[in-house]
């Protein structure tokens, strides 16, 4: 009997240890669940807080919102497997963000397949940040004009909006014009160095006549926007090509993040502080620029298409300010996950084609080309 009692004591001891570990795991995961839930809720809220007047770190949360949502789903599964009431927290927070998920991922099963048809009042719009029409090879900038025009030709848009459009002595604008002969009408604004028709700025090219055009200038900054009223198939549509303030994150800093170099870097605190400062300053600048673009949208007398590089993700204040009352072509005609910026682990959709209710979007695509750090966005519209 003595030996049997000893076995019971050992068994009870092991059970107590198991219960202790189980309780500790639950405690740690409960804290993680609550923290993730709070931060995710704040990321939902961030789109309503103007970075130019406040908000602090909230402006940064849209960058990681998709990752936070995935973590929330993992935590939900963790608690469901354990059949624990804590599952209600990630479930509730996840349900609150279901609408936001459509900004990053569209189920393929909901996509409508149809034949492309440019008759019946259809036309294709393409927006593309051309990265200065250059590529970096062995730390040297070389012209990417041929690659850029080949990418454009493969999409063959009726209306083309370019950001970081650059004309140089080696790759002049007239050469680009000859390489897109079907786009006979254009509006180009150089914000940097416009001598001898060379410079850096924005361009709208169109198969159809441009009735009126204008420039939306952001004073003392290299970015801006241009608008064109395009006459097509008996109607007039206003096209607004937008390039908002850059993030100012350098190529080396992008590599620093993408390659996870900060894991072993002892100076990471200083580098992250520098990036944090630059991002925060430019969030505030873009918020003010978004207000200017919003006024331009409201003043348009025609159906409008707003496209370009916003340099902000879909849950940001900048996006919400501009997109209010407009439709997002990705949400209406895209499918699967989407990103347009080829860095930060391919998580960022910062290039958009938005449009008013008098138009209908078809065939959203964002093909991958090597000639820029951005992917273009192409959408077929129906009047």
Image (spheres, grey):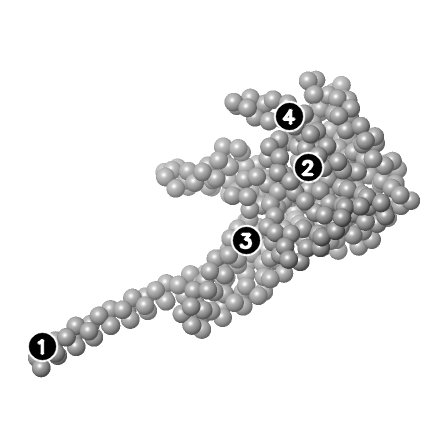
Q: Secondary structure under badge 3?
A: helix
Give the mark nearest the N terminus, 1 or 2. 1
Q: Secondary structure under badge 2?
A: strand
Give yes or no for contact between labels 1 and 3 (Cβ–Cβ under 8 Å): no
Give the mark nearest the N terminus, 2 or 3. 3
Identify the residue at image location x=89%, y=43%. Answer: 233
Identify the residue at image location x=53%, y=51%. Answer: 64
Q: Which mark is residue 66?
A: 3
- If the image is split into quadrants, where does the N terminus sit? bottom left
Q: Which mark is residue 144?
A: 4
Instruction: Give the spatial CA distance, label 2 vs label 3.
Output: 24 Å
Instruction: Give the spatial CA distance, label 4 vs label 1.
Output: 83 Å
Give yes or no for contact between labels 2 and 3 (Cβ–Cβ under 8 Å): no
Number of the front mark, 1 or 2: 1
Report the residue marked by disc 1: 3
Measured along the vertical axis of the image, is residue 98 above or below residue 344?
A: below
Residue most toward the right? 234
Give the mark nearest the N terminus, 2 or 4. 2
Give the mark nearest the N terminus, 3 or 4. 3
Q: In terms of image quadrants, where is residue 307? A: top right
């Amino acid at each position: 009997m003595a030996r049997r009692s000893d076995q019971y004591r050992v068994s009870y001891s092991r059970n107590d240890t198991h219960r202790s570990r189980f309780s500790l795991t639950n405690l740690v995961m409960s804290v993680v669940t609550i923290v993730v839930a709070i931060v995710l809720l704040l990321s939902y809220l961030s789109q309503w807080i103007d970075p130019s007047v406040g908000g602090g770190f909230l402006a940064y949360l849209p960058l990681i919102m998709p990752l936070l949502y995935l973590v929330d789903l993992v935590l939900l599964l963790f608690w469901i497997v354990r059949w624990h009431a804590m599952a209600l927290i990630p479930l509730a927070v996840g349900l609150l963000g279901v609408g936001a998920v459509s900004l990053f991922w569209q189920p393929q099963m909901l996509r409508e397949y149809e034949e492309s048809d440019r008759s019946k009042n259809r036309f294709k719009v393409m927006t593309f940040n051309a990265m200065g029409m250059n590529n970096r090879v062995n730390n040297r900038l070389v012209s990417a004009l041929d690659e850029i025009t080949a990418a454009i030709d493969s999409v063959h848009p009726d209306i083309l909006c370019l950001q970081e459009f650059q004309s140089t002595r080696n790759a002049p604008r007239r050469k680009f014009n000859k390489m897109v002969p079907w786009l006979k009408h254009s509006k180009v604004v150089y914000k940097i160095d416009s001598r001898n028709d060379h410079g850096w700025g924005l361009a709208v090219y169109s198969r159809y006549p441009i009735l009126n055009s204008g420039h939306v200038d952001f004073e003392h900054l290299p970015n801006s926007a241009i608008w064109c009223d395009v006459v097509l198939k008996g109607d007039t549509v206003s096209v607004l090509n937008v390039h908002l303030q850059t993030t100012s994150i350098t190529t080396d800093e992008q590599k620093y993040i993408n390659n996870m170099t900060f894991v072993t870097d002892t100076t990471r605190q200083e580098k992250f502080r520098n990036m944090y400062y630059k991002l925060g300053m430019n969030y505030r600048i873009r918020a003010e620029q978004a207000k200017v673009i919003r006024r331009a949208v409201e003043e348009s007398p025609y159906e409008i298409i707003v496209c370009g590089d916003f340099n902000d993700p879909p849950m940001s204040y900048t996006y919400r300010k501009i997109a209010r009352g407009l439709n997002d072509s990705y949400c209406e005609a895209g499918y699967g996950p989407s990103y347009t910026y080829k860095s930060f682990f391919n998580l960022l959709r910062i290039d958009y084609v938005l449009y008013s209710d008098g138009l209908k979007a078809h065939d959203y695509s964002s093909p991958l080309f090597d000639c820029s750090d951005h992917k273009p966005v192409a959408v077929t519209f129906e009047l």
